[in-house]
Image (cartoon, grey):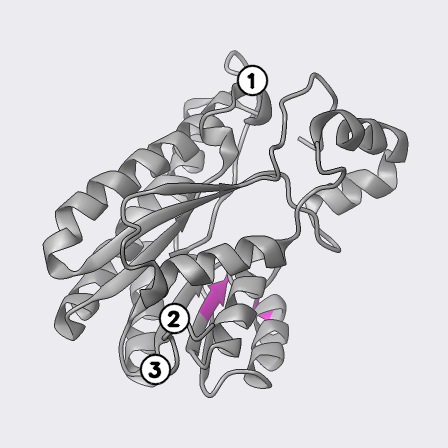
């Protein structure tokens, strides 16, 4: 299927590994120009080398988009080098602190900054370029933790992911007349080499096997490639009638009382 993305400029935050990198590869396979950023310079360099074998144009920056100056630098560089901003994937996310009674105000603030506030910031920066082009697409990466308390790890993480799902629908309403669609993809537990679940699998194989057996009707965790395919479709003109929606990509994952890697 031709997704109609050839030649489009796609920006992906946290694009150096995991879901972000797989999404960048999938967009590149559609003929897109790719802009990625991440905090680790070595990771960015490796991802850029990987993507340049697949994409007609790649811009890769070491940048922490939770910092306003880095976010603005990333957007401006991509707009200049890629010729615009057609698609924005807000993929950066993390969580800080522990349970409610032991977490600090700073833990909550840092978690909301990385999951919500930087998404607002990146969207504000990207939308003027999309308005100039007459259309655009934004995909926010949330999590099934946004509505499954047993899978959220902490209250601040789940609350921030729930806020991101609500934010998506609100932004979609605000931007609909500018022909800018905004959607959410909410992955379940995703495993890739070097990721948190992979580390947990290696360190505690018995607990991992029991968790997979009890919590996953399909008998396995998901892969970043499976999430990336949904991201690319949602961003494409083929999904023009999908707007303000939250799409779970979780293989029917079930909450089970078991140890997890957080």
Horizontal side of residue 199 vs 41, given as left or right: right
Check disc 1 and report its element: helix, strand or loop. Answer: loop
Front label number (1 vs 3): 3
Q: Earlier in the sequence, mark 2 or mark 1?
A: 2
| Crowding at mark 1 (Cα within 10 Å: few <14, some 14-19, many 20+) | few
Residue 10 marker: 2
Is residue 57 shown above or below 184?
below
Give whichever of 257, 213 is nearer the camera: 213
Q: Position of residue 93 (x, y in %)?
A: 48, 45
Is residue 154 shown above or below 178?
above
Q: In the rendered image, which residue does mark 1 sit on?
A: 99
The residue segment tinted magenta is 36-41
Q: Position of residue 8 (x, y in %)?
A: 35, 77
Is residue 251 shown above or below 233?
above
Residue beneath the point at 12% across and 60% down: 178
Q: Is residue 25 magenta?
A: no
Residue 248 appearing in the image = yes
């Amino acid at each position: 299927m031709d997704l109609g993305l050839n030649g489009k400029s796609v920006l992906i935050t946290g694009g150096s590994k995991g879901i972000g990198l797989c999404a960048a590869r999938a967009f590149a396979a559609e003929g897109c120009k790719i802009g990625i950023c991440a905090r680790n310079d070595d990771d960015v360099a490796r991802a850029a080398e990987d993507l340049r074998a697949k994409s007609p144009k790649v811009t890769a920056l070491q940048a922490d988009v939770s910092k306003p100056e880095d976010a603005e630098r990333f957007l401006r560089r991509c707009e200049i080098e890629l010729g615009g901003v057609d698609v924005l994937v807000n993929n950066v996310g993390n969580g800080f602190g522990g349970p409610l009674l032991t977490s600090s105000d700073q833990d909550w603030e840092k978690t909301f900054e990385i999951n919500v506030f930087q998404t607002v910031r990146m969207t504000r920066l990207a939308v003027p370029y999309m308005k100039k082009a007459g259309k655009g697409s934004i995909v926010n990466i949330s999590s099934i933790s946004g509505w499954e308390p047993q899978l959220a790890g902490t209250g601040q993480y789940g609350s921030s992911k729930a806020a991101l799902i609500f934010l998506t629908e609100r932004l979609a309403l605000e931007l609909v007349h500018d022909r800018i669609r905004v959607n959410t993809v909410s992955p379940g537990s995703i495993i890739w080499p070097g990721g948190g679940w992979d580390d947990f699998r290696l360190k505690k194989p018995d607990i991992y096997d029991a968790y997979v057996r009890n919590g996953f009707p399909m008998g396995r965790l998901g892969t970043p490639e499976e999430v990336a395919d949904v991201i690319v479709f949602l961003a494409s003109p083929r999904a023009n009638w999908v707007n303000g929606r939250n799409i779970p990509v979780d293989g029917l994952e079930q909450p089970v009382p078991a140890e997890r890697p957080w």
